Amino acid sequence: MAAAIEPSLGERGSDLSEVEVKALEIIRESGDEGIYQHELWKKLGLDSREGSRLALRLLKKGLIVREPTIHRGRRTYKLFIAQQGKERAKLEVRIGTAIEIPCFSCKNLERCHEGGFFDPRTCPILRNWLNNKIAMIKRAME
């Protein structure tokens, strides 16, 4: 199992522990979807403390990318294999635009998550705001 990963890591592969090699293989198998940090811990049989330390070691070595996300209403991280020579897309957000988003003043923000009763995918207030923004951009382009 380790032999399949180490050649692609070059010199960095030689300083990896067995659990780090296994973790990289699991993360690589997850592909572009990535894997939630807690799912990786479970697959490796680690507790949350050691799993978090493992993810941070791999991040520090530049082998993975760790993106914050919300899963079932809880904050967590999604892990991806770092692409050498490629950077993940970065999005520039201006504070003026972000403040306008209705979610930040919504009384249900803390309970809003994908698949929940309050879901941003089905929120009529957010949908209306987005439709207005799109219409405004289209008018500006004309």
Image (cartoon, rainbow, N blue to C red):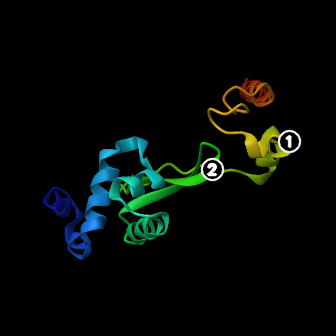
Q: Quadrant of residue 11?
A: bottom left
Secondary structure under tag 2 reads strand
Report which quarter residue 107 is drawn in.
top right
Location of residue 83 with respect to 9 vertically, above or below = above
The reply, left or right, for residue 102 in relation to residue 49 is right
Q: Disc 2 marks which residue? A: 74
**Counting residues from the N terminus, which is met first, the one under dot 2 or under dot 1?**
2
Residue 70 seen: yes
Residue sitting at x 71%, y 31%: 117
Name the disc covering residue 107, or none. Answer: 1
List x then y, in percent, for residue 77: 52, 55
Q: Position of residue 123 (x, y in %)?
A: 74, 28
Q: How many marks?
A: 2
Q: Which mark is residue 19?
A: none
Q: Residue at point 75% right, 25% down?
A: 131
- Quadrant in which the N terminus appears: bottom left
